[in-house]
Image (tube, grey):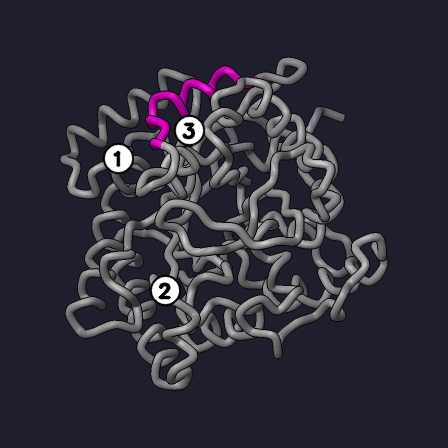
Amino acid sequence: MPENNFPKLHNATWPGVVGKGENAEPPISFDTMLDMTAAAEVDGVKFDGVDLGLFEPHFDINMSDDDIKRLADKVAAKNLNIGSLVAPIWGGPAMGSKEDRAVFVDMVRKSCHIGQVLRDLGVRPYGIVRIDSASSPQEWEKNPVENSKLIVQTFQEACDVAADFGERLAAEGEICWGGMHSWRVMLQTLEAVNRPNMGFQADMAHTLLYLMGYNHPEDRVLPENFDWNDRATLTDALKTMTKALRPWTIDFHVAQNDGTVFGSGSHDKTGRHCQALDPNGKLDIAVDAGHWLRNENGELTKAFRHICWDGCMFPNEVMLKQQTWNDILATMIKVRQMHGWYEPEGAVVVYTI
């Protein structure tokens, strides 16, 4: 049997920006992130691509088509593809004023245009555009019903715009985003949006905190004072959450978490992304990824054609060591070996919403 070659393995470039600046460490340039990704290699296997955060200082969301072409050429020169894109929607909260929400939708429009051009150039064969509510759980809790209505309306408008570009939107499940800060609230938001091109982005570091009820204790799944050595209870909790959210999941981040929250720079406290081999990590990464990549019967869903490592808010000293990315790649390879599949290279796959 040939070795699994799907899902494709990507690295995120936005950890060079997220949590940096504003009294924190300086950002790491896009070129450096790209170089570190391209240089990683484990037993002859390399990363297949990168996912991009379309925000400064890495990118100008108003970049011209010529700029997009230069970006495509730069990434392709490293023998990498581009996958999912993060829309810079934080200047316009999804539950904000009419003007705020218009800014949000416009950022999605610009991101989808970039995504479409990259597809047309042949460097982006798969991937989604990621969004969140750009709103805090504390603000959401002041009026959950009305705020959820606004978020749903904004997401629906964004989905309609994205459909014009043949794009899908994935809402990031993270405890720092209002209306998305618990697994059950996230599910309710997705169901209310009810658009064929609306889905969920699961990040293993963030969704672990869903189980602990941070920012929404009533939806806690793990018991209080949970003993992390109790793998059976953790597995049952993961199964409960993934059963609900897996049918919506169209984008997936492999990550590790030590069961705590963390924030730096301008980024609110959220799931702590740990290094792949962190001894304090609470997840068995390759095994636990299977709860998202396989259904209840153990069958592969093949719901997305690439997976991405997200290591936000690692210290720069860590991020500038090549071994860090080799360890991450090795972990990604284990996930693919356990939950991947083989397709002949060059097989035609139709990109649809």
Q: How many marks?
A: 3
Left or right? Give the position of 83 relative to 100: right
Q: Which residues are magenta?
A: 26-40
How many angstroms separate mark 2 from mark 3 (CA)? Answer: 28 Å
Left or right of residue 190, residue 211 in this image: right
- Per the image, label 1 sits on a secondary structure element best described as loop
Q: Which mark is residue 141?
A: none
The residue where tag 2 is placed is 133
User: As shown in the figure, which amino acid type bears the numbered disc 3?
Assistant: Asn
Identify the residue under disc 3. Answer: 81
What residue is shown with label 1?
Answer: 57
Front: mark 2 or 3: 2
Does the magenta run of residues contain 34? yes
Q: Which of the 4 image quadrants contains residue 353?
A: bottom left
Residue 52 appears anywhere in the view: no
Q: Main secondary structure of the magenta part?
A: helix
Q: Dot 1: few (<14), some (14–19), or many (≥20) neighbours within 10 Å?
A: some
